[in-house]
Image (cartoon, rainbow, N blue to C red):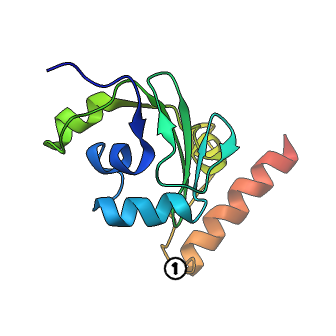
Amino acid sequence: MSQPERQRIDKWLFFARIIKSRTLAGKFAAAGNVRVNGEKIDQARFPIKPGDTLTIKQERRVVVLRVLGTGHRRGPAPEAQLLYDDITPKPVEAAAAEAGAAQREPGAGRPTKRDRRKMDQFRNSDAGA
């Protein structure tokens, strides 16, 4: 069975396992949480095709996906991941952590006295160099 050239955004979000149900996917798209090729959409019936770039605003993050194909069913996760390529840029915190800056895990709570001393020591070592 050949895949359709275009597919509704709500169907695709459901098949790609981005949203739990098709009803929720329709409401999600209609609420304006999805951009297709930089254009904000407000309809669940908006057609997408392979090659489109989707910017999806979720609760705590923004995800950028490139559509690789359209699906014909909601299959297992490995099958769903074949429908898109995640091109989300790395968050600034992750880039800073890779550069060697002292970073704490998000949601780790307040730093302890020991953590604060380590952070002060790290900051002072940069100032003296």
Q: Which amino acid is tagged 1? A: Gly
Residue located at (70% from left, 60% from top): 121
Residue located at (48% from left, 63% from top): 28
Going by the image, does 37 lie left or right of 88? right
Residue 65: percent from left, percent from top: 49, 36
Answer above or below: position of 1 versus 25: above
Answer above or below: position of 86 versus 42: above
Q: Which of the two residues, 8 or 101, is positioned nearer the viewer here?
A: 8
Residue located at (14% from left, 42% from top): 75
Residue located at (36% from left, 51% from top): 18
Q: Which of the two residues, 8 or 81, is positioned nearer the viewer here?
A: 8
Image quarter in which the N terminus is found = top left
Callout 1: helix, strand or loop? Answer: loop
Residue 9: percent from left, percent from top: 44, 45
Residue 68: percent from left, percent from top: 39, 24
Answer above or below: position of 124 versus 24: above
Instruction: Name the residue that disc number 1 marks.
Output: 109
